[in-house]
Amino acid sequence: MLHAKGTHAGALLLGLMAMYLTAQTPATGPNAGGANPPAKKPAPPGLPPEVIKLLGMAPPEDPAAVERGTREFVTNCAFCHGSSATGGEGGPDLVRSVLVMHDEKGDKIGPVILQGRVPKGMPKFPMSPAQIADISAFLRDQVQKRGNRMTYEIQNVITGDPHAGEAYFTGAGKCNSCHSPNGDLAGIANKYDAVTLQSRFLYPKTFSYPGMPKVGPAPAPTKVTVTLSSGESFSGTLKHVDDFSVSLYDSSGEYHSWLLERTPGIKVELHDPLAGHIALLQKYSDTDMHNVLAYLETLK
């Protein structure tokens, strides 16, 4: 049965690929450009229907149809295209398909499914119009999520072993030398969702720009100690450091800076509280990352 399902999914893939390539072929002749009008841009969540219509955008899909279409797609197509239609075992990303982008309730993909492409190895699939429309709703919902990247939901993040993650936390990772599950990390899984939590321990140094949402408190600033050849030293919050200069603000707020090549014997010692995280990023295996996240998710 598994072989048969894989064969059907692969055949469906071949047919959709053929239609996809045809849809991308530039039209020629007097009617060139009229066969495939531009796909409607997905409307962001929460936009009123009248505004969506006025702007000519694609309205959100019916959640019930998307749910039904998800089941149909996973059963018949996920073997090759992946459960989210973004590619799988040899199957391309259908979310990027021009054919899918222009589909309306199955009018483009329906003929491929019903008629098949026998010369290419794709049999006919006796699906009802309702089933095809539901698959179309699922695929278009995936397209809309891709279009609205800021609202795209990342799923299946927690896939590791929490026990192995705890062993790494207290062993090879030496995370417990700075953190405690009963101290600073107590209830951490209640403060952040899994995606944010993963990002914070893998990439603790994040940079924000105007308009970007801020997630959690700002990381602790890097401290620095500058010692001159005379023995005089200055300590404070690092402002800037590179191969040519270093600058800091001391505890009183006074600014100090030095040009390294003009200050013989100068010593610069950085005290970065995130240095351990940055060093681990070069050592983590994928399994380590997933296991640590699974362990952190138990700290509720």
Image (spheres, rainbow, N blue to C red):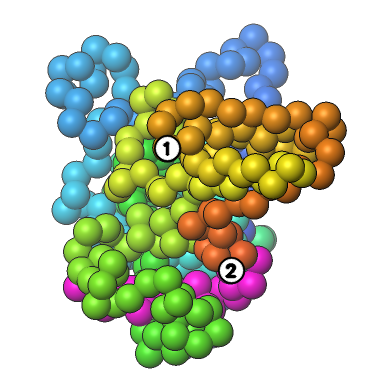
Residue designated by label 1: 251
What residue is at 84 percent from the left and 33 percent from the top?
Answer: 261
Earlier in the chain: of badge 1 and badge 2, it is 1
> Few, some or many C-alpha atoms within 10 Å of disc 1 (few <14, some 14-19, many ≥20)?
few
Q: In this view, does 226 lie to the left or right of 202?
A: right
Across and down, in percent, residue 291 comes to 44, 79
- Estimate the spatial distance between the alpha carbons at disc 1 and disc 2, rounded to whole Å: 31 Å
Query: Which element is circle 2 on?
Result: helix
Q: Is residue 117 above or below residue 287?
A: above
User: Predominant secondary structure in magenta?
Assistant: helix
Query: Which element is circle 1 on?
Result: loop
What residue is at 51 percent from the left and 47 percent from the top?
Answer: 222
Across and down, in percent, residue 132 comes to 33, 53
Res. 280 mark: 2
Using the image as rendered, state which of residue 209 and residue 177 is in the foreground: 177
Find out whether residue 294 is within the magenta segment: yes
Magenta stretch, residue numbers:
280-300
Please state, as top left, top right, bottom left or bottom right, where the C terminus lies in the image.
Answer: bottom left
Amino acid carrying mark 2 in the image: Leu
Amino acid carrying mark 1 in the image: Ser
Find out whether residue 224 is within the magenta segment: no
- Could one spot residue 191 in this view of the protein? yes
User: Disc 1, disc 2: CB below 8 Å?
Assistant: no
- Give the label, 1 or 2, closer to the camera: 1
Q: In this view, does 224 lie above or below 287?
A: above
Using the image as rendered, state which of residue 221 and residue 164 is in the foreground: 221
Across and down, in percent, residue 284 comes to 59, 73
Using the image as rendered, state which of residue 142 and residue 37 is in the foreground: 142
- Could one spot residue 116 in this view of the protein? no
Across and down, in percent, residue 147 comes to 42, 35
> Few, some or many C-alpha atoms within 10 Å of disc 2 (few <14, some 14-19, many ≥20)?
some
What residue is at 59 percent from the left and 28 percent from the top?
Answer: 256
